[in-house]
Amino acid sequence: MAYSSGGGRRAVIVALVDMFDTLKPPGLDALMIIVAGLGATLVIVQPFTSPSYMLSYALDPTLFAATIFLALRGAAGITGLVESGVMQAFLSYPLSRTHIAAALYASRILAPSIIILGAPTATIAIAMWPLVSQDPAEFIATYAAYLAQALMYGSVFMLIALISKTPGTSGVLSVAFYFAYTVLLGLLLYIVGRAAGVELLQRVAEASYLPGIALIYYGGGSIEIWQPLMVPFLLVASLAVVYLYFTRRFEP
Amino acid sequence: MPEKILDVRDLRKKYGGLEVLRGVSLSVYRGEVVGLVGPNGAGKTTLLKISLGIVRRDGGEVLLNGVDPWVEPSSREKVGVIFERPNLPSSMSVREFLESAARLKGASESDVEWAIEAVGLAGHEWKEFNKLSAGLKQRAAIAHALIGSPEFIIADEPTSNLDPMERREVLTLIARLNKELGVAVLVSSHILPELLRVAKRVYALSKGRIVAEGEPQEIFQAKRLARIRTTEPERLASRLAELGLEASVEGLSVLVRSISSPSIVYEALTKAADEGIPVLGVDLVEPALEEVIS
């Protein structure tokens, strides 16, 4: 039987091959079981009345776990590909760098984010269906907000991995970026804005965490029209830089 | 004249401030085996990576299958690659990975079977890559390069990390692929005699420049060497030098370089014998890498 191949199809094959490494147990499987079990337990013991607030209760700690996974296993795994020489093998295929970048992003960032955040979301949807069914769109939008936040972190981690090319440096710099981002944008900006009475700074601080914006919105609070767009903008911008770096500068 | 499958002209590459390739030109025609020899750090791997479009170039032109490999990925169609360090994923069995590579290259399952048999990997194909010995890893990497019926194979030091027997087998396989299937091969090594065994043409690369090129016979003739064993090496070396030969003492031998014709050596030896300098034996030796790049 002869296999057929095209650019997109070839990229899917590379993504699947690479996903074997990303999802190789133990790692994601154990994390998935823990976050799914704890997430469901957390929301069942609490009296929730809002799907978004209920989901955030489980996904806030899950997002942290996902971020650490993306930094240390997902993106840093790309440096492992470079060190082992597997990246050279991928780049020697008749496949454009755009396709390879897409395949690596799918296997290293997108799939783990969907799975890690999706595991507790799915168990909560099943366990708390009566509440979720009141507003499934709100539930899904909240999940999407967490996913966008994770993907934004993951895109920056991938860029760090491509530039640093060593797992240790990549992991440390990625975690450092995460804490710098959350502390600088999420906390300090808010405190400074509040102390100085500059509302814009407070709004930027709020917008740096998209799930928080979702909670304010679904909780009936007021948000600026640009606030839900800030994290997606950062995601698109970081993805664009990853794409440009990988296709024009990256050398294994 | 067959068509060029790889054409590299005036290639330049810098890493930081260090110029690793300085105007390298090289070509490989369809159906021929070309050797690229040079010491470690000469720029061989960089040259091969740029030829594949894996690494950017700073100057010059590269055409692989008639197009620029940095810009056009289709240039790598029907091109198999063997890297210096065997490099397949360890998260799945070699067989599963080769099947994935076959899907990617539009090859058939029977291609996978053939490649496994051709490289002698049968019986080990279901093991994970990192559980194979160095020799088997290299075989797996070669099998990977053979998937998709390649018309051109770029092999970067395919015999490194192998024992002499395995080295011979790999070279024999390369020669067989060329002879039976007409596959063009560009193979690099820092061991010249290995390349002379399989290559029709050889390029010698040193410090980022091509310092010698031609057919193995031409290189042999240009760098012909003789080692003369004697109990009086200093006396013999000075006598040979007087006769216009480039001679140096190496222990109880005298090494004579760049011999234009063996008869000159024989004539010199006769004169040495007449003068009572004992000659215990003469070996005409293959030039080592350092002789070629000197």
Image (cartoon, coloured by chain):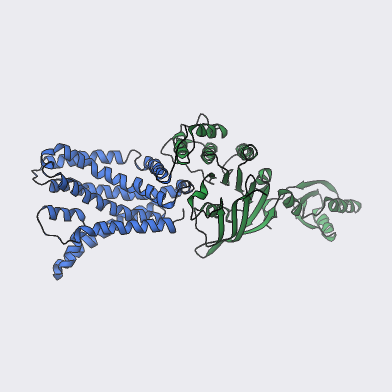
Chain colours: A blue, B green
Tell me where residue A33 appears, x and y as whole percent: 25, 38
Number of disc labels: 0
Split into 4 quadrants, where in the image is the C terminus of chain B?
A: bottom right
Residue lying farthest to the top in this orientation: B123
Nearest the eye: B181 or B243? B181
Which residue is drawn at the image coordinates 43% and 47% (left, top)? A81
Left or right of residue A207, residue B19 in this image: right
- Residue A189: where, in percent of width, then height? 20, 65
A252 left or right, relative to B117? left
Relative depth, front residue between B92 and A106? A106
Q: In this rendering, is residue A166 above or below A31?
A: below
Can residue B38 be seen here? The reply is no
Q: Position of residue A113 (x, y in %)?
A: 28, 46
Q: Position of residue A172 (x, y in %)?
A: 34, 54
Which residue occupies the extreme bottom position in the image?
A196
Left or right relative to B48: residue B221: right
Quarter assignment of residue B173: top right
Q: Is residue A28 left or right of residue B15?
A: left
Q: Which of A170/A2 is in front?
A: A2
Res. B233 in view: yes
